[in-house]
Structure formats: C-alpha cells, structure tokens
Image (tube, coloured by chain):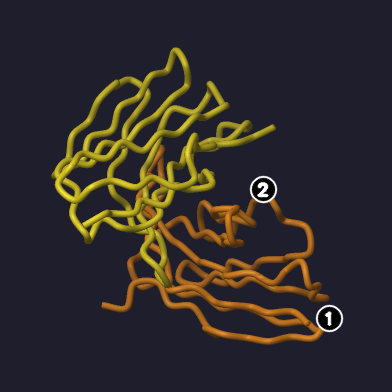
Chain colours: A yellow, B orange
Amino acid sequence: GESVGLHLPTLSVQEGDNSIINCAYSNSASDYFIWYKQESGKGPQFIIDIRSNMDKRQGQRVTVLLNKTVKHLSLQIAATQPGDSAVYFCAENGGYDNRDDKIIFGKGTRLHILP
Amino acid sequence: NAGVTQTPKFQVLKTGQSMTLQCAQDMNHNSMYWYRQDPGMGLRLIYYSASEGTTDKGEVPNGYNVSRLNKREFSLRLESAAPSQTSVYFCASSSGGSGTGELFFGEGSRLTVL
C-alpha cells in the first residue's frame, strides 16, 4: 500500500560520530522528499529537502542522498551533537495520486546520542 | 510571530461526544493540514487543504470532517468520538505549490477518548 517507511526504529550514535538515518519509499511517482526532526513534546521541524532530479543535497551538517533506482533516501548528520537527539521522519509528496501538496510521512527513527 | 496556533492543547472526551479542533496560521500560507500521531506510528495525514475553498482526504479520513473557513483557519471535527481517535493531533501549514514540503507545525492537541 501507500507507504514511506524506515529501516530502523532506533539508532544509537556516539557523540561526535556521523549518523545515517535511512528511509525506503514505495511510490515511484513521488518527486519530492523531505526530512523532518521532532523533539519530544513538539511538532516536527523541517530539516532539508530534495527533488527527484537530484541525488544529493547538502545543508548545514546534514546531507540527504536519494537513490531512485532502489527507492531509498538517507539523512546523514555530521559530528552528531546531543541536540540532535530526536525522532527523524522522512516524507514524500504526492502519494499514489501524485498530488504535490499531499505530504505523507514515514514512521520515524529515534536517534539516541551516547555521551 | 505566532505561526500555527492550535486549540485546545488538551481534551478529554467520552465515546460518542463531538468536538472541533481549531487551527489558525498567520503566515499567509495556502496549504493547511491535519495529521494525527500515535505512538510508533509516525504522522498520518487526515485531511489537507491545498487552497482556500478546497479540502481533500488524506490517509485516514474516516470519522473526521474538516472546514477551511478562510485562508487562515482550518478546523477538524470529530462528530462521534471513538477510543481509536485517542491521539495527538497536529495542524500544519505551508506556502504550497509544486512540491513545497516545508510544513510549519503547531504544538499539537492531545485528545483522549474514554
């Protein structure tokens, strides 16, 4: 069915190491993908996005990689900090009826930073 | 700068009662959304409105109705609440248009149905 899913529900990373959070999507018609961060008790916050005509996009300490061949998306966080502890969601637009404004979220990965 | 404001923040209902969650944004955004978030389930789209005067079903619309009252406001109504609707509800808005995924979220409304 219509889904944007994640490989791992929880990821533990040593402070200062790089984190990689993965996401699989099922709708090959989706052309826009977004990563969100949600801290406890708050609404999600936009991190970075990428269009399907790109395979890599960089932000401040974050990089998103898109592999359309295998329908896989990843978020890389460099030099992970305690403030990066949160749940991370990937999202896509369109869904199966390919509506640009219909933003569908995956289940999320909890990132836990080890001291 | 308020952003997206949701009311109420907390609500307890009995099965069968009705209620409306209110949402307003002050960013002149075209698109507005209602999501629900259950533990371990991520956010699921209930309804969205790509522009004033239009509404569309999301992934889990059953048991809900929405009204895009004007450009600023998008309400979510539960006509006959059920325990399965116990959840945290988030309203969001975006400027909309082709694949603009930067949604701005409210703080959430925690609903418990007994």
Nearest the eye: A68 or B31: A68
Check whether the beta carbons of the residues at disc 1 and disc 2 lie within 8 A of each other: no
Please report the residue visible at 63 percent of the width from the left and 56 percent of the height from the top.
B47
Label 1 is found on which chain of the structure?
B
Q: Position of residue A5 (x, y in %)?
A: 54, 37
Q: Which residue was labeled with disc 2?
A: B59
Q: Nearer the viewer, mark 1 or mark 2?
A: 1
Question: Is A89 positioned to the left or the right of B111 in the image?
Answer: left
In this rendering, is residue B45 above or below A7? below
> What residue sits right under mark 1 in the picture?
B15
Towards the viewer: A100 or B71: A100
Residue A75, position in %: x, y?
Answer: 31, 37
**Amino acid carrying mark 1 in the image:** Thr
Q: What residue appears at the point 42 percent right and 18 percent down from the top-left corner?
A: A68
How packed mark 1 is, by other alpha carbons closer than 10 Å (few <14, some 14-19, many 20 or more), is: some
SS at circle 1: loop
Residue kind at label 2, given as amino acid type: Glu
- Could you tell me residue A15's position as x and y percent? 19, 51
Residue pictured at 78% horizontal, 58% vertical: B62
How many residues crowd mark 2 within 10 Å: few (<14), some (14–19), many (20+)?
A: some
Q: Which quarter of the image is occupied by the C terminus of chain B?
A: bottom right
The structure residue drawn at horizontal position 21% and vertical position 57%, both measured from the top left corner, is A115
Q: Number of labelled discs?
A: 2
Indicate whether B43 appears above or below B7: above
Among the 4 quarters of the image, the one containing residue B101: top left
Q: Nearer the viewer, residue A37 or B2?
A: A37
Classify residue B16 by image quadrant. Answer: bottom right
The answer for how far apart the CA atoms under marks 1 and 2 are is 23 Å
Q: Chain of mark 2?
A: B
